[in-house]
Image: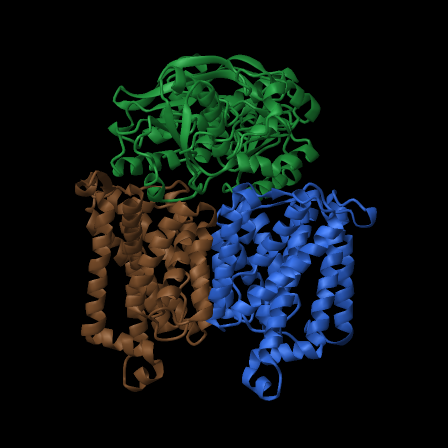
Chain colours: A brown, B blue, C green
Amino acid sequence: MQFWVIQTLNSLALGGLLFLLSSGFSLIFGLMRMANLAHGVFFMLGAYLGVTLLQAGVNFWLAALGGGLLVALLGGLLERCVLRALAGNEQGQVLVTLGVSFIVADLCLVVWGGDPIPLSPPAGLRAPLFFMGLAFPTYRLAVLFVAIAAAVLLYVVMERTRIGAMIRAGVDDMAMARIVGIRVSLLFTTVFCLGAALAGAGGVIGGPMLSAYPGLDSDMLPLALVVVILGGVGSLVGSFVGSFIVGGLYSFGTALFPDLAYFVLFLPMLLVLVLRPRGLFGRTLA
Amino acid sequence: MTGLEGVGRWFWLAAAAVALIALPWLMPNDFYVNLASQILVYAVWALSLNLLVGFAGMQSLGHAAYLGGGAYVCAWLIANAGLGHAAAALLTVLIIGAMAGLFGVLALRASGLGFLMITLALGQILWGVAYRWVDFTGGDNGIRLPSRPAPFGLALNQPAPFYYFALAVFAVVLLVMWRIAQSPYGAALRGTRDQPRRMSALGYNVWLIRWSAFVLAGFWGGVAGLLYVYYNKFVSPQALSLQQSAEVLIMTILGGVGSIIGPVVGAVIITLVKTVVSSYVDRWNTLLGVLFLVVIVFMPEGVVPGLRRLRRRFGP
Amino acid sequence: MSITLRRRTVLKGLAAASAGAASLRAPAVIAQPAPIRVGFLTVKTGPLASGGIQMEQGLTLYMKERNSMLAGRPVEIITADTGGVPANARAKTQELVERNQVACLIGPLAAFEALAIDDYIRQERVPTLSVAAAEDMTQRKANPWFVRATSTSAQCSHPMGDYAAKELKYKRVGVIADDIAYGHELIAGFQRVFEDNGGKVVQKLWPPLAVPDYGSYIAQIKPDLDALFIGFAGSNGFRFIRQFNEFGLGGKIPIIGGMTAIDESLLKNMGDEALGLISTCWYSAQLDNASNRKLVEGMERDYKTDPGFYAAATYVNGAVLEAAFQAIDGKAEDKDALIKALKATDIKETARGPVRFDPYGNVVGNVYIRKVERKGGKLVNAVIKTYPDVSQFWTWSPQEFMANPVYSRDYPPARFLE
């Protein structure tokens, strides 16, 4: 009994983290028709920036914000200087983000070294929560709430603001959006920065659970891919649902079928790609 | 396909052949001969991917499945099932070919980015199995190959004999690729890359052509896997990783898709950066990333066609 | 700022000989012998990186104390980072042997790396002072070119099994370790001796080496265990204990550690939750002998940290190497002589205590049971019991021991799992 409760809570916490990671990826994919393979490295960079900010004594949540903003800056630079030069060449853009991920990952290694660095959760959330004879890390529940709050915020932005309407229009039909007068290039930069910010903040928030370590990027990127493929490209609801499905698959998979852990994760993704390429909630084909 | 015309082309080919054959005597020590062998292994692998990426225009991020897959199958058959080298090699390429057939059916359900994702997913599944199914694959420990093959009784344990073996295989693969490029099949393949709808209208079975390219790419990838495991006498899950798939894709694109020499040049550059440069420059990963960036942005067709373009612009 | 070992240690002996112009490598006035090239395989990225970095620090310290001269010859250490990936370990080993023409190797760190380079070492006949703990390298498939001054994976676990059963009086114990050869072997040794003395291992958990989050494993730990034996390497022990406490299990289930789980290098990041943790190792920074005092002082001075398993490993290997070089008059390139001298090592005092090798090339030395205490304001591994003269075979004869299969995930079979 204890096992199931704790694993479910773990899945929820992981799912929340994955939402922060993959929502940005999904938006970028949906709007710019491009798989940003640097997304994993945005997450990792965020985590490392969090390490430095926390060491400098910055409050945890401010560090998360700070990490997000700094990574957004990097994302913006990347988008304007490099991706723009390859406008129209989507596959080239994808490969360029791969190249960028090599560079940033290596530079992280130079700056922060090869040893995994755990981040400390904020002081108030360190003690475990006791209920029903079980204990669970309070911080992980906080992650879940932060993710839900972020989801609500994003939903409001997407559904209730002008810029959200523009993004949705772009995802649905780029040509029409241009004709209607939407400034697509500015939109691209905005979305890319937003995605990067979410990933960067996610890295800091995930730090106490996962630590900052070289290889975090290549551990997280495939998970983001699975979430987005399962949930559907360009769909926020899809990212949300997909994140928790993957969180559950990962937590229960590693516990119940340790030998087949990755199989359990990627098989659903494969099935979806083959049987229903648009994912559960996607509007367009991958 | 090499871009050189007439007598000049044969001269250069002959010169290259002589240099390659004389290589073991030209190198200061065994390390460089082994390096050359490594380059040949990766060149074969890049050539196999080129069928897919260059000729058929389909980008795959899961090609490590065939290198690693071939290496694992062969190592397992010899180390755990006790097969001899000839039987193991034959069985390996057949199994890998079949796997490529299956994967091709799955992957070709989509095109472009979807295709990329599916190949990535398939590669990751194989990697996950190799990494976690410890009882079968040894997990992180990998599988050791007890011995190198001895074709026709010639031992390949020393660097120079192995190099010649790899060179022979490489020459065969190069020839095969060249013949495919020249053949009607090759033309049809390039047709499906450039004008799929027109090809379809003309009566070509586009799906079948693409699938056959996928299988061929996987098959020759498996051959590269054999060379890989013979050279290293060892295989671990890292051979199936996303990193490896990305590297071979980079090799192919860097060198220049669509030409035969391109992937070979790419393999040379990347392998040299990884091994030699990494001894002098700690930040070789950054170098690799920057190289990739520069090539994609300024020479998207690759180094070989890019240089050709520059030569035409500036040269006589 | 910490001092790092540059890729090639400069020939300090030569520089000292040439008077004045230190910036120019002028031809030596006095005929200096050619440098001995020693290859050093370590890990500077990934979960084992913290260990690899300490290995480098320990070796640098040893060389620095001797001005990079051993047995009258300058020594050049050529470092290679394998990243903890077996394929890279092979590639780097080949590079060191073929391109740099090293006389011998120190390292590698991980057992799976050692397994990957085993046949190459045999083929090229390279004397190797291993840090990696892979059992069979000095047992059933003993590599004649291998000597190991550290320990096999299970060498320190056997005494712990004895201690846990007899002195801690535990009856029902769970085990958790990294899912790699090292983890399997370490646990197996503990299980065997523990169960031979009346204990029962009722749960076994194997998280992958590089898993960032132990949540789903901690959730599976049975709440009624007498103790949990942890066999983590690198920095995983530290992260596990932290998450263990976050899940409220700290203090509820005592933790006992294998030889790398509660390492000195991790203690400095831990707090009061570490007090009282018992572990086993062939080393402790608290050992009181002249050689260790120098090591501890040097590490404190240069790197602001206590030496642990990994730093001590290379420091002791340095001592073994030096003794061997001296025994053969510095003729390090004579491989047969070098390996013979290495195997004949019998040093009474190294940082870990006495060191000698059994006929299979593995060390016979002391194993210490340690307990975390606070001393002088910092956490240390205080030695509470010493098992002297422990070999890799514990109380069995080599023949008896090797008649069984090698330790693995499934051997000895777990008969008491619930």
Where residue B30 sits in the image (x, y, percent)? 70, 43
Q: Nearer the viewer, residue C92 or C17?
A: C92
| Residue shown at 79% from the left, 50% from the top | B151
Q: Quadrant of residue C126?
A: top right
Query: In this image, B69 relative to B83: left or right?
Result: left
Q: Is residue A181 above or below residue B155?
A: below
Where residue C282 sits in the image (x, y, percent)? 46, 20
Query: In this image, B33 relative to A80: left or right?
Result: right
| Residue shown at 37% from the left, 75% from the top | A284
Where residue B313 sits in the image (x, y, percent)? 59, 76
Hey, which residue is sitting farthest right in the picture? B152
Q: Is residue A10 above or below residue A28?
A: above
Hey, which residue is sitting farthest bottom in the picture? B201
Q: Nearer the viewer, residue C65 or C363?
A: C363
Q: Nearer the viewer, residue A162 or B282?
A: A162
Q: Quadrant of residue C308?
A: top left
Quadrant in which the N terminus of chain C appears: top left
Query: In this image, B310 relative to A28: left or right?
Result: right
Count the numbered circles shown.
Answer: 0
Q: Quadrant of residue A193?
A: bottom left
| Residue shown at 29% from the left, 74% from the top | A186
